Image: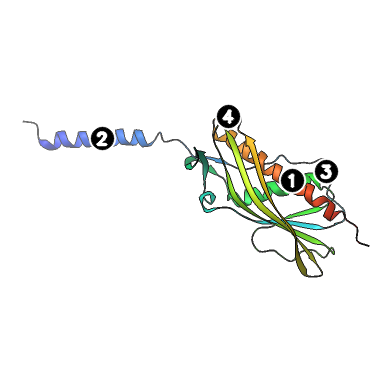
Amino acid sequence: MIPYRFIFFPLVACLICLLAGCFGTSLPTRFYTLSPPENRSAPAPATYDAVLAVGPVNIPNYLDRRQIVSRTGQNGIVLAELDQWGGSLDDEITRVLVTGIAERLGSLHIAALFGKFPAMADTGRDYRIPVKVSRFDGVRGGTVVLNAVWSVVEKRDKQEKYLFTQESAITEDVAGDGYEALVAAMERAVGKLGREMADRLAPLIQKVDP
């Protein structure tokens, strides 16, 4: 009779090899960022007409995570374990908004804001745009929806004043079924919001006081 140990240990070794092979082929995590193209043709302004700080950008709890969130149906959401943001989503949104505004208001210095409103440069008139996002997700192969409420706050002589508050609802078609297409549509949606902000801001910032 063959000793028990001569049968048991080879079986265990084979099982370990099989398990190592299965777990060794796991798929890598893919990371994404909302990356607007750089505009290198516009020179930096020599003087500041005004300073505009974008932020803070507040996002709902269901988006405050590394996993990219997509929607299934009216109320269902999916968390993509293998498709994640390379950084925090609120920072990504802020950066793209700044770029979108800068494209419209190239003569102004645009400062991104993360967290508490800092001391701004003494230009006479400074502005900030706090943003509250209520929804920012989409269906793969469908549509991205961005709903946000934002305000314009003017700081003059160390006093702050809310000039107006506006609600924006933006949709963008997703040109594909994968997460890369979903992220690209999300980037375009945030860019549209930034340009919408700039168009509303331009008459205020360009106004000349008597």
Q: Answer whether labels 3 and 2 touch (C-beta < 8 Å).
A: no
| Label 4 crowd (10 A; few <14 / some 14-19 / many >=20) | some
Determine the secondary structure under disc 1.
helix
First in residue order: circle 2 vs circle 1 = 2
Quarter holding the N terminus is top left
Q: Residue at x 74, y 66 (%)?
A: 119
Mark 3 and mark 2 lie on one chain; the one further toward the N terminus is 2
Residue 79, horizontal then vertical, whole percent: 47, 43
Describe the element under mark 3 as helix, strand or loop: loop
Q: In x, y percent, where is residue 65?
A: 51, 50
The disc, 1 or 4, on the residue closer to the chain's N-terminal end is: 4
Of badges 3 and 2, the one in the foreground is 3
Type of residue at label 1? Answer: Glu
- What distance separates the C-alpha of mark 3 from that of mark 2? 62 Å
Which residue is under mark 4? 176
Q: CA distance from mark 2 to mark 1?
A: 60 Å
Marks 1 and 4 sit apart, C-alpha to C-alpha, by 26 Å
Find disc 1 in the rendering and name its residue.
196
Mark number displayed over residue 15? 2
Residue type at mark 3: give it.
Ala
Left or right of 11 on screen, residue 80: right
- 115 with respect to 51 (left or right): left
> Which amino acid type corresponds to the residue marked 4 in the rendered image?
Gly
| Foreground: disc 2 or disc 1 | 1
Q: Quadrant of the C terminus?
A: bottom right
CB atoms of marks 1 and 3 within 8 Å = no
**Viewer-nearest residue: 141 or 82:** 141
Q: Which residue is mark 3?
A: 42
Q: Earlier in the sequence, mark 4 or mark 3?
A: 3
Element on which disc 4 rests:
loop
Q: Nearer the viewer, mark 4 or mark 3?
A: 4
